[in-house]
Amino acid sequence: MARPDKAASVAELADKFRSSNAAVLTEYRGLTVAQLKTLRRSLGENATYAVVKNTLTKIAANEAGISTLDDHFAGPTAVAFVTGDPVESAKSLRDFAKDNPNLIIKGGVLDGKALSADEIKKLADLESREVLLAKLAGAFKAKQSQAAALFQAPLSKFVRTAEALRAKVEEQGGAGTPAPAEAAE
């Protein structure tokens, strides 16, 4: 029978897997406690970084419905549970791994889909959610401006044509257009 402390650990990890947008598995062998503390700080408030036991975490991930990570539970493992923007957390992990080659990104899961280490690096290369939304809003605004100009074009063309006709009539001195009374005689 399972010990109560292990069962509680599995339940806590399973809850973290369920409540997270993403989870990234890393190998931290060779990192000092100070470096791990720096890594936790760099992840910010939207992610937690925990050193875990492989067997318990594998059981917890399976309980949470994530069986795609089973191959990554070998060697010393730590998990970054991301509750905020996964791009920011992936960037933090990538940048920390550049400065500290002992941190190895093994793989992860994003919204239930398994990600390889290369896919996590590609995710880190994306711009943040706010930047992408701003670009999308800018594109929509540009399209609206183009549509407004398109709708105004016929009206402004008509006004320019009418103004040119009026100027031509004035240039000719008003002659050439019979008055309505003269036309009847």
Image (cartoon, rainbow, N blue to C red):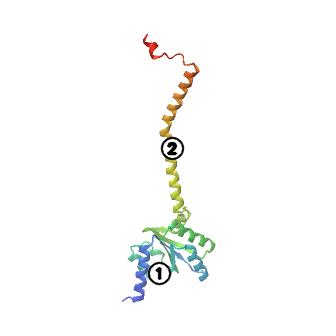
For the residues carrying marks 1 and 2, which lies nearer the camera in this image?
A: 2
Mark 2 secondary-structure assignment: helix
Question: How dense is the environment of label 1, judged by Cα within 10 Å: few (below 14), some, or many (20 and up)?
Answer: some
**Rendered residue at 51%/50% (across/down):** 141
Residue position for label 2: 146
Question: Seen from this angle, which residue lies furthest left?
Answer: 1
Q: Could you say which disc has been placed on residue 106 in the image?
A: none
State the residue at coordinates (56%, 63%). Answer: 125
Residue type at the position of mark 2: Gln
Any part of residue 68 in sight: yes
SS at mark 1 in the image: helix
Q: Nearer the viewer, residue 32 or 159?
A: 159
Of callouts 1 and 2, which one flags the residue occurring earlier in the amino acid sequence? 1
Number of marks: 2
Residue under pointer 1: 54
Three-letter amino acid code at disc 1? Answer: Asn
Neighbour class for label 2 at 10 Å: few (<14), some, many (≥20)?
few
Where's the N terminus, which quadrant? bottom left
Which image quadrant is residue 175 in? top right
